[in-house]
Amino acid sequence: MSKNSNYTGGERFNKLSKKDGYRSRAAYKLKQINKLQNLIKQNQNILDIGCAPGSWIQVIKEITKGKANITGVDILPMEKIEGIIFLQKDLLEIKDSDLKDHFHLVLSDIAPNITGIGITDTQNMIELLNIEIYLINKYLVKGGSFLAKCFQGNSFDHLKKFMKNNFDEVIRFKPEASRKSSKECYLLGKFKK
Ligand SMILES: C[S@@+](CC[C@H](N)C(=O)[O-])C[C@H]1O[C@@H](n2cnc3c(N)ncnc32)[C@H](O)[C@@H]1O
């Protein structure tokens, strides 16, 4: 870490992502969690919710040497990545007919646009989490894992409660590449019941 206090962890990873060819510093969040938990494996069906600009997909392709079936969803367009299914959709409008597979691993880095009004931001995050929860109940296989972003506070409590009831193990992460000043953190549910 630089001695310059303006040179935050976030900026350090922004620079590193340019050097390493990742589309965003978010890559290092998934890399760090995966190093600890070994979630991503070849031949899995993997769903990446809120996938643009695509650095988590780059990481998955790298780890699996291209041998995973990846579906990504984002409301924004994403520069093409070969060999994956990309659905440009609002998660709030996703339909069962959009998803054909069951998944071994579901990742979500989705967050709503921040309004700055705490109660609205929390409600919007919980609304997204409720769709994620619906998808987990329906599309994640028994024994599968779910890694999702949330924010310390009500959305964290909401997700943790769901995970505690539905997974054998629940672990919280604050990756190094996540700004210390942000309430962002990640919860991992392992081994869906
Ligand atoms: C932090 S970024 C994800 C970065 C990604 N993990 C990566 O590594 O490139 C969060 C994404 O969530 C998406 N998002 C926010 N609200 C959404 C919604 N309602 N439906 C679909 N995507 C949404 C944003 O467009 C944004 O691309």
Image (cartoon, rainbow, N blue to C red):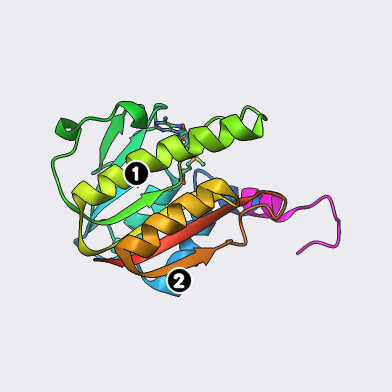
In the image: residue 47, left or right of residue 34: left
Q: Quadrant of ligand 1?
A: top left
Q: Are marks 2 and 1 in contact (CB under 8 Å)?
A: no
CA separation in Å, label 2 and label 1: 24 Å
The residue drawn where x is 34% and y is 44% is 132
In the image, taking residue 125 as reference, residue 91 lies left or right, namely: left
Query: What quarter of the picture does the C terminus occupy?
Result: bottom left
Q: Quadrant of residue 41?
A: bottom left
> Looking at numbered disc 2 in the image, what kind of residue is underneath it?
Lys
Residue at image position (30%, 61%) is 166
Circle 2 Cα neighbour tier, 10 Å, few/some/many (<14 / 14–19 / ≥20) = few
Q: Amino acid at mark 1?
A: Glu
Residue 164 pos. (x, y %): 39, 64
* Magenta-drawn stretch contains 12: yes
User: Within the magenta stretch, is there residue 22?
Assistant: no
Q: Quadrant of the N terminus?
A: bottom right
**Of residues 119 and 42, which is closer to you in this image?**
119
Residue 176 in percent (x, y) is at 62, 62
Q: Secondary structure at mark 2?
A: helix
Pointer 2 or 1: first along the chain: 2
Question: Residue 175's x, y, as percent?
Answer: 58, 61
Q: Nearer the viewer, residue 186 or 126?
A: 126
Instruction: Please name the residue that numbered disc 2 is placed on.
Output: 35
Residue 94 visible in the picture: yes
Residue 21, can we see it?
no
Q: Residue at x 13, y 40 (%)?
A: 100
What residue sits right under mark 1 in the picture? 132
Q: Which residues are magenta?
A: 1-14
Q: Secondary structure at mark 1?
A: helix
Give me the disc on residue 16.
none
